[in-house]
Amino acid sequence: QENLTKYTGELTINIFDELTQNLRGSGKELRIRRQLRHLGRFVLPWSTLYSAKCSLKGNFLVEEHPVLFGYRPKVRKKPPTALVASGVPAPPPPKESPKPMVLALDVTVDPPLEHPTRVQPQMTLGKETNMMLKHIQKWHDSLKSKHDTRILALGMDVDGRSRLICRYVRPQKPPEHIAAEDPFAIEMAARYVALVPSL
């Protein structure tokens, strides 16, 4: 389970269109020529499939080529034209945007793999008081009745003693290049957090 969790591979699905042509040879000879044209690809990270309990179903966006020769992309329907008063110049027509290619996919792993289970570390006397440990144990028991075992409240410090995980959480200012008025500030902050190494 540990090796499957740390695996960083990807499942790449390439999409082709098969073109068949009938070529006449000498006399009555008829040859069939088949040609595969690459339309795009879809990349599914293994971590996404494994976290979904090895079963994933839905519509996924395909990474297309910028130009596909010999194909006419489907165009989104134009919105209804608004009425314009006399003497007022009509607004320019909206640009037609092609529809993205979507792949309906149902991915499963056969035989199914056992999903990793998180084990709550044993509570040992450490930095937390006995009253706090009893309160945490009572809180965890209430979560077991709801079949929710994904929440961890305690961790181990370098000395092997129990500590509340929230004690290690501190507010941190974003980097200087992330401005609050930037429309992509949330995405930039999320990328910054993703670069923080974790043990």
Image (cartoon, helix red, strand yellow):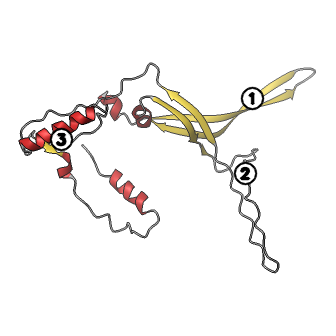
In-front residue for pair 143/46: 143
Could you say whether the residue bearing mark 3 is in a helix, strand or loop?
Answer: strand
In-front residue for pair 32/101: 101
In this picture, is 175 found above or below 196?
Answer: below
In this picture, is 181 found above or below 109?
Answer: below
Which residue does the numbered mark 1 point to in the structure image? 34
> At which x and y percent is residue 106?
55, 30
Q: Quadrant of the C terminus?
A: top left
Could you say whether the residue bearing mark 1 is in a helix, strand or loop?
Answer: strand
Badge 1: how crowded within 10 Å, few (<14), some, or many (20+)? Answer: few
Q: CA distance from mark 3 to mark 2?
A: 54 Å
Which residue does the numbered mark 3 point to in the structure image? 154
Q: Earlier in the sequence, mark 3 or mark 2?
A: 2
Which residue does the numbered mark 2 point to in the structure image? 75
**Residue 155 disc label:** none
Badge 3: how crowded within 10 Å, few (<14), some, or many (20+)? Answer: many
